[in-house]
Amino acid sequence: MLRLLGARLLQGAIVLWIVTTATFVLIHAAPGGPAVLADPKLSAVERTAIEHQLGIDRPLPVQYLAWQSSMLRGDLGRSFLYQTPILETVLNRLPNTLLLVALALIAALALALPVGLYVGARPGTPIDRFVATANFTALAIPPFWFGIIALLIVAAQWHLLPAGGMMTPGVEISVIDRIRHLILPVAVLAFPIAAELIRFTRSAVREAWTAPHLAPAMARGLGARAVSRSHVLRNALLPILTVLGLQVPMLVGGAAVTETVFAWPGMGRLGVEAALGRDYPLVMGITVIVAATVVLTNLLLDLAYRWADPRVRTEG
Amino acid sequence: MKRSFLPLALLALFAFGGPIWYRIDPTAIDLGRTVAEMSRAHPLGTDESGRDVLARLMTGGQVSLLVGILAGVVALLVGTIVGALATARHPWLSAATSRLLDAAMAVPSFFILLVTVTLFGGSTTTLVLAIGSTAWMSIARLVRAESLSLRERDYVTVARALGQPPVAVFRRHILPHLVPTLVAAASVGVAQAVLAESALSFLGLGIEPPTASWGNMLTGAQQNLSQAPWLAIYPGLLIVLTVLAVNAIGESAHLRSRVA
């Protein structure tokens, strides 16, 4: 258990190293350097001063080590656009994104587990084929377009739900109002994740039904429902958890697009705004924080994996 | 398998062949007729700047298909190389590549794309390279899984026993059998790339107007959602059809690789 956790931590460290190094390489490969230096009014002296202040007059390996060590200290620099410390700016927006992502994950699981469990036990039936086709189609729909269509129908035509934002302006903050603003973005974000999860749950459940220990359980007189609950689901949970981990990076990317469509003040939309404003320290800071969040989530999922699989729990 | 290319070929015909007989300039602005409904002059109406929607769907399709397919090819190249290295018999080479691959799966690639377009802008070349180099992970996994099973075949063992160098064994005995898997993998890459390009262009970070792309046509559509809902329907529908067409190719190749 400890050894596996150690391996996971090492992998997380590699992920963060890849992300920080990739962003470092990208900045230095970019033509022209930082946008502040593009100002033609700058004199040579001012230019040198800015270069010195930014530390970009030092040799590349030194800059690389300085960049890595400031990352380790949690110092991500300052945003060009907002002139605020990046860590603080991003952490302010992070809870909004986490709320969206967590609710979307729960919604996706709540839909995918029952559906996958149901059709996985009935391979080849019309309902199984229908779900498979629906999934195939769902995965081809760009999430942002789905969001626009949802806005078109639910908000613009039917006026059922607000078209965006986190709260109705001028109205007192209430739970109901917040929930009304959450429904569409959560649904849009959960949609592709649910499709992917149903696909894997379906095949994992199908596989789990072929396990040899099910026959004796059935022979003992256990009903199909009880077998499904206590034997099939438990075994199918492992591949599902693995897939869930692989979905997390996709989920945060999807959050950026969803937040932009629905004007949700989260970290993803901040990243898009920063990219549009060519605020590259902010974009990189967000990328590093997102990567760290993904690593942490995967670590938590790993703990869940240990919980779900007693074989792994007793090892080492 | 050949028949599965038909839907994609039809879409390509629409995008590349369409402008040959439909000769309306997709960038011509007509401010007197913005967000106009269908008419004889504009069969699918006009957008927020009075540009012809049908003509933009065609040229936008060229951009979306080109970026999607080329980025898919880049992803296929990187993915195949990494996948092959991960199955090399060299002890630490394969271990290191596998760890790198596992780690790369956990990298939030959308944000790496954001960094890239922030620094380099959203030109076609940048998009192809950036999307291609963030979409190779699932391809590498497919290639790794398939070549791990292929390399245990008897004829591979024989070739190795005869003293053929590893690269030659891979090229001559494993790669040909990988072709259906590679087609399936390429379709995964292209589908992912089409979706990524449309998302970036929609956000204003990819292909920039006046050049049309299915993604950036939707940016204007969202602003005129209540007056002109059709602007939001057509480009999105074409993206969905393209991804479905590409996935259909992959699905049929995948079935073939199971039979072989």
Image: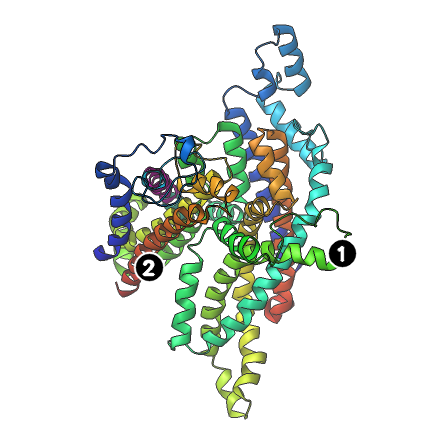
User: Which of the pair A13/B127 is nearer the observer?
Assistant: B127
The span from disc 2 to disc 1 (Cα, nearest Å) is 48 Å
Q: Where is residue A124 in the image (x, y as percent from the top left)?
A: 37, 76
Where is mark 1, residue-wise?
A174
Is residue B71 located in the magenta-colored stretch of the structure? Answer: yes
The extreme right residue here reads: A172
User: Which of the pair A175/A57 is nearer the observer?
Assistant: A175
Locate the C terminus of chain B by quadrant. Answer: bottom left
Query: Position of A83 compared to A290: left or right?
Result: right
The kind of residue tagged 1 is Ser
Where is mark 2, residue-wise?
B251
Q: Where is residue B230 in the image (x, y as percent from the top left)?
A: 42, 48
Highlighted range, magenta: B59-78
Q: Position of residue A242 (x, y in %)?
A: 54, 60
Residue at disc 2, secondary structure: helix
- Residue at x 24% of width, y 44% of height: B13
- To which chain does the residue with label 1 belong? A
Q: Nearer the viewer, mark 2 or mark 1?
A: 1
- To which chain does the residue with label 2 belong? B
Check residue A275 in the rendering and tell me which mark sits there, or answer none: none
Using the rendered view, name the quadrant where residue B51 is placed: top left
The kind of residue tagged 2 is Glu
Q: Give the prevailing secondary structure in the magenta stretch.
A: helix
Locate the N terminus of chain B by quadrant. Answer: bottom left
